[in-house]
Structure formats: C-alpha cells, structure tokens
Amino acid sequence: GAGVSQSPSNKVTEKGKDVELRCDPISGHTALYWYRQSLGQGLEFLIYFQGNSAPDKSGLPSDRFSAERTGGSVSTLTIQRTQQEDSAVYLCASSLSGTSDTQYFGPGTRLTVL
Amino acid sequence: AQRVTQPEKLLSVFKGAPVELKCNYSYSGSPELFWYVQYSRQRLQLLLRHISRESIKGFTADLNKGETSFHLKKPFAQEEDSAMYYCALIGSGGYNKLIFGAGTRLAVHP
C-alpha cells in the first residue's frame, strides 16, 4: 500500500512569509509525528498527534510553528513569518497507534528560506 | 535528560571488513532503542529495534544497560550498506516521540 506522503517536496520562500507543509499518513494509522532535520540540530521532534487526544507540542521551537490534524488523517504544519534558521527538511511519520509501534517516515519537505 | 550520542560522524571501511557503529544513551528509566537507516535518496526507515532481538540485513545490536550502549554491528560490510545510520530512543511516559542521535555516515569502499 501507499506509504506516508508529503507535499510539497521542495519549498523556497522569502523571509517573513508563511508556509504550509502537508502530510498524508498511512491509512488507518492513528499516530502522526512531525520531525525536523537540519544541519545544526540533527533530527528533532516537533509535534505528535494521537487520535483525538490533545497533541504533544513540546518540540515546537517557537509560537510561529503550529500544526493541525483534520479528521484524524491529514496534517498541516504551518510556519508563520519564516526565518532563515527555519530552513530544514521537515519529516512526517505515522504509526499504527501511540505505543511503541514502528514509525514510518515520509520523504520530507525541504524548506529553504531566503 | 534524555540523550542519544553517536560519537562518529563518518565511518569508512572496506568491503568485507567488520563494522561497529557506536551509540550511547542517557535515560533514567528503561528506554526502547532503535536503529534507523537512510540510504541515498530514500526515506528514513527502521532497521531494527532492541526488543525484537533480530538480525536485519546482517546487522545486530545488543542493549547493554550497564554501559548504556546500543552499538550496531555487522561482521562483513557490503557496499550497499553505505548510508546514514541513526540511533534513537523512545522513553517511557506515554509518548512515542523518537529522540535521535546525530547520525553516523557509513561508507563502504570496494
């Protein structure tokens, strides 16, 4: 079946603009995660959604970052007033449940802020 | 604090040589440990997890709680093993977020 998909694959934006990154998890997976992969920070957790529970936002680096998950499926990560340090690859993953099930990663969105 | 340390950024070996990618962790409880791999132009994928105690693509990893280590080993490296390897842990507490090490690039030369 189809794996986790993300769009766009690449996004170039100007400093100060808002961007939206989309993630389509594997069908039936109740847990969804966003991570960021950057040169300076490596792979870091951003936010976690599990079913209808309140999301774990503990990894979001600032209040410019927010995420939604509509209908328990598709998720959108929004970055407002982008800064150059936001440039990174944003990875989405999903797992069957919120326990220690295997997380399946998407191909990522490469964000470049000029 | 929860932390994963991979001391080597790059490990370069010849085909057929043994490989050991080091991983140490810091966690006060009983974490679950993983190795993820990212081949060139492919997505990040799970290689193995310590609770499975299985060998994948010839790789094994043993959790050593005394040394807080989870080193990844393979007796005979192959060129197709060249990739970026990440050690990661999930702590207890009800959340499934992965905490990753910085990664080690393995380069296997012919």
Image (cartoon, rainbow, N blue to C red):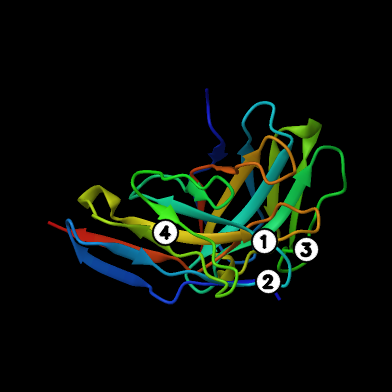
The reply to whether discs 2 and 1 touch (Cβ–Cβ < 8 Å) is: yes
Distance between the alpha carbons at the discs numbered 3 and 1: 19 Å
- In this orientation, which residue lies closer to the viewer: B67 or B2? B67
| Mark 2–mark 3 distance (CA, rounded to whole Å) | 18 Å
Which quarter of the figure has residue B15? bottom left
Circle 2 is placed at which residue position?
B27
Amino acid type at mark 4: Tyr
Name the secondary structure under disc 2. Answer: loop
Q: Along the line of sight, which residue is nearer the eye, B75 or B3?
A: B75
Whether labels 1 and 4 share one chain: yes
Residue type, numbered disc 3: Ser
Q: Disc 3 to disc 4, how far (Cα)?
A: 25 Å
Q: Is residue A105 above or below residue B14?
A: above
Determine the residue positioned at 78% across, 65% down.
A63
Q: CA distance from mark 2 to mark 4?
A: 21 Å
Residue at figure coordinates x 52%, y 22% from the top left: A1
Badge 3 vs badge 1, beta-carbon distance below 8 Å:
no
Q: Residues within 10 Å of mark 1 (few under 14, many from 20)?
A: some
The residue that mark 4 highlights is B85
Distance Cα–Cα, label 1 vs label 4: 19 Å
On the image, the x and y values in percent for residue A75 come to 70, 40
The residue at 49%/59% (across/down) is B62
Badge 4: few (under 14), some or many (20 or more) residues near its Cα, within 10 Å?
A: many
Name the mark on residue A93.
none
Q: Which residue is mark 1?
A: B31
| Rendered-image quadrant of the N terminus of chain B | bottom right
